[in-house]
Image: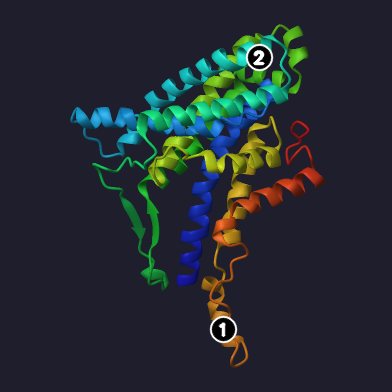
């Protein structure tokens, strides 16, 4: 039983946490690609920016003496989402919209997004420094432990409060996004523009409005992902920079331009990474009794060393590009 509990803690919970972050990030990436047709590499730093916005707001409320049973970073999340959405609109108006008016090619937009990445990182380091910060400097992180002694286990299933909130928020966002894309007129317009932008414009769809809404959604979701990630680990200027490539891999594997594909791709990449670095000896240790004398399972039976975890996403990405370039849900050709 302890082996199963260890697997639940290290794989199921960790994979779901990582999958939630990847999915939220990949949705924004895939929406921007579907509507604007370029890879927005600054999306990871927009996630980090959202985390710092929430950090400042949480600090202000704490200084004012506001007390909440929930983490302060989570309490200020709605306001942070609005501010991040406005900043996303500002980034588009200041950098990408002028390039679109000049008929810039996707590769030009991609290079511009790399410039925006460096700009955001530079500003964050200038304002907040390069150190690590925590939302829990003035409050403690609650850890919920589910006693499994009734089932023969000697260790509990452990999950933190931010992880529980992450699961709830991710599920709520996925449901809300589904209803928006399938039930609302604007959501249907976004899907139509993602399928064929020229036909959508001829059909009378307000493409400028669709672009603005795309940035609002992408900026808001980036903020949610950044705040949830910072609550789970810590906040730093390069918080999401190191996971932007797995996020893009998730979007491509699921199908670029397909929101549901981004969700599936996010969890697929996350669980693949988690299973690859998991030490299977911890689960298979009872098999030692069946092995001949003098033989035993190695101390570490992980498929990939932890430091090479990112290679798993690249392997899945390469296989997808070779076998199914449009991804699982047949998105735009990669």
Q: Is residue 8 visible?
A: yes
Determine crowd level at label 2: few under 14, some 14-19, many 20+ residues with C-alpha closer than 10 A.
Answer: some
- In this rendering, the label closer to the viewer, 1 or 2: 2
Q: From the top left corner, tell me how far across and down residue 40 is, in percent.
A: 62, 28
The answer to whether 264 appears left or right of 121 in the picture is: right
Tell which circle, 1 or 2, labels the residue nearer the N-terminal end: 2
Number of dots carrying numbers: 2
The answer to whether 167 appears left or right of 116 in the picture is: left
Q: Tag 2's secondary structure?
A: helix
Q: From the top left corner, tell me how far across and down residue 219 is, in percent.
A: 51, 25
Q: Is residue 139 depicted above or below 67 in this figure?
A: below
Q: Is residue 156 depicted above or below 239 in this figure?
A: below
Q: Tag 1's secondary structure?
A: helix
Q: Residue sitting at 79 percent across and 40 percent down?
A: 325
C-alpha span from label 1 to label 2: 63 Å
Looking at the image, the residue that sits furthest to the left is 65
Determine crowd level at label 1: few under 14, some 14-19, many 20+ residues with C-alpha closer than 10 A.
Answer: some
Q: From the top left corner, tell me how far across and down residue 286 is, in percent.
A: 54, 80
Q: Is residue 166 depicted above or below 143 in this figure?
A: above
- Along the line of sight, which residue is nearer the eye, 244 or 33? 244
Residue assigned mark 2 = 99
Looking at the image, the residue that sits furthest to the right is 323
Residue assigned mark 1 = 288
């Amino acid at each position: 039983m302890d082996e199963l509990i260890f697997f639940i803690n290290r794989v199921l919970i960790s994979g779901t946490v990582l999958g939630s972050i990847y999915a939220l990030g990949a949705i924004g990436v895939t929406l921007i690609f579907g509507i604007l047709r370029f890879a927005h590499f600054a999306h990871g730093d927009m996630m980090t920016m959202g985390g710092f916005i929430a950090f400042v707001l949480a600090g202000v409320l704490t200084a004012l003496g506001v007390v909440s049973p929930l983490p302060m970073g989570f309490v200020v999340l709605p306001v942070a989402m609005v501010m991040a959405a406005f900043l996303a609109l500002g980034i588009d108006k200041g950098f990408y919209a002028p390039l679109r008016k000049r008929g810039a090619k996707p590769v030009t937009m991609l290079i511009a997004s790399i410039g925006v990445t460096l700009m955001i990182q530079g500003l964050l380091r200038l304002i907040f420094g390069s150190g690590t910060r925590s939302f829990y400097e003035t409050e403690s992180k609650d850890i919920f432990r589910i006693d499994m002694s009734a089932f023969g286990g000697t260790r509990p299933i452990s999950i933190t409060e931010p992880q529980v909130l992450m699961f709830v928020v991710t599920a709520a966002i996925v449901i809300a996004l589904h209803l928006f894309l399938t039930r609302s007129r604007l959501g249907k317009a976004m899907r139509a523009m993602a399928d064929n932008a020229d036909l959508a414009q001829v059909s009378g769809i307000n493409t400028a409005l669709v672009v603005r809404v795309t940035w609002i959604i992408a900026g808001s979701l980036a903020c949610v992902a950044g705040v949830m990630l910072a609550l789970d680990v810590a906040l730093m200027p390069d918080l999401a920079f190191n996971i932007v490539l797995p996020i893009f891999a998730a979007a491509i594997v699921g199908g670029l331009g397909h929101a549901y594909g981004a969700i599936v791709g996010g969890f697929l990449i996350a669980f693949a990474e988690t299973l690859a670095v998991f030490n299977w000896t911890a689960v298979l240790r009872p098999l030692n009794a069946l092995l001949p004398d003098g033989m035993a399972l190695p101390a570490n039976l992980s498929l990939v060393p932890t430091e090479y975890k990112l290679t798993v996403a690249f392997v899945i990405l390469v296989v997808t590009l070779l076998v199914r370039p449009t991804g699982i849900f047949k998105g735009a050709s990669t």
